[in-house]
Image: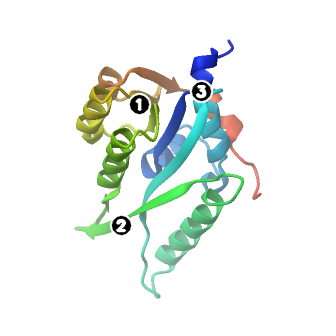
Amino acid sequence: MEAKESEKQQRVAVFIDGSNLHYKLRDLGIRNLIYFGYGEFSQWLAMERNLVAKTYYIGVVRAKENDKKGQELRKNQLRLFNHLSSKQQGFHIERGYIMHNDGTFHEKGVDVKMAVDFLVGAYENLYDTAILVSSDTDLIPAIEKVRSLGKKVEYIGFSHKPSFGLIKNADETKLLTKGDVEKFQFHQKT
C-alpha cells in the first residue's frame, strides 16, 4: 500500500526506550543487539514518511576498575553507542544513569528525558507524528498532552508483551512479532 502524498510530507520522530526494546528483542531470541539495524528499523516504522529525528534513551553503565563483569558491560555499551551514532544509524543518544540499590539495578532519568523531548518536540512543532518504541505506562501523561497539541502518537509494542495502557492512549498501535524484527538483526559486526 503506497502512502498518500500528504502522508509522505508528514514529519516523524522516533523515540526508542533502549532498555525496554533490548529486553523485548531478547525475549524474542534476537541476538547481537549491539549491531541491530536500529536506523533501518526506524525507517521501516516511519514507512514512506519524512523521518526527521531518531533518539535512543538508555541508562549508562558505570563500573569500578576491579569489576570484570561491569567493565565488559560498559565496553559493550560503548560499542552500542558507537554503532547508534554512526552515519549509517544516525541516532541521537540521550543518557540516563543506572543506580544500584539492594542488589538490584534501576535505570534512572531515562523516562523523564524521553517525556521532556516528546513534549518539547510537540510544543516546538518539530514533528507531526511521534513513534514511541516503549511499553512504559509512565509516559501516558506525556502522550495525552502531545495528542492534545494536535500531534499523533504511534505506539510500537510487541505482541508477546503489549502495553494495554499505551494501546488505549495512542492514536495507532503496531504490535511487532519476531518476524517483523529479525530482518534487522545483524549476524556479525558491521
In the rendered structure, the answer to whether residue 78 lies left or right of residue 158 reads right
**Is any part of residue 178 visible from this angle?**
no
Mark 2 crowdedness (10 Å alpha carbons): few <14, some 14-19, many ≥20: some
Residue 97's tag is: 2
Disc 3 from disc 1: Cα separation: 32 Å
Give the number of the mark in front: 3 or 2. 3
N-term mark: 1 or 2: 2
Three-letter code for the amino acid on which mark 3 is drawn: Gln
Do tag 3 and tag 2 residues touch (Cβ < 8 Å)? no
Residue 90, position as x, y percentages in the image: 63, 53
Q: Assign a secondary structure to mark 3.
A: loop
Quadrant of the rendering where the N terminus is positioned: top right
Three-letter code for the amino acid on which mark 1 is drawn: Lys
- Can you say whether 24 is above or below 188 in the image? above
In the rendered structure, the answer to whether residue 156 lies left or right of residue 85 reads left
Q: Which residue is found at the position 61% from the left and 43% from the top?
A: 30
Q: Assign a secondary structure to mark 2.
A: strand
Residue 33, position as x, y percentages in the image: 61, 52
Do tag 3 and tag 1 residues touch (Cβ < 8 Å)? no
- In depth, the one of 139 and 78 nearer the eye is 139
- In depth, the one of 126 and 116 nearer the eye is 126
Q: Which residue is found at the position 37% from the left and 43% from the top?
A: 124
Residue 161's tag is: 1
**Is any part of residue 37 visible from this angle?**
yes
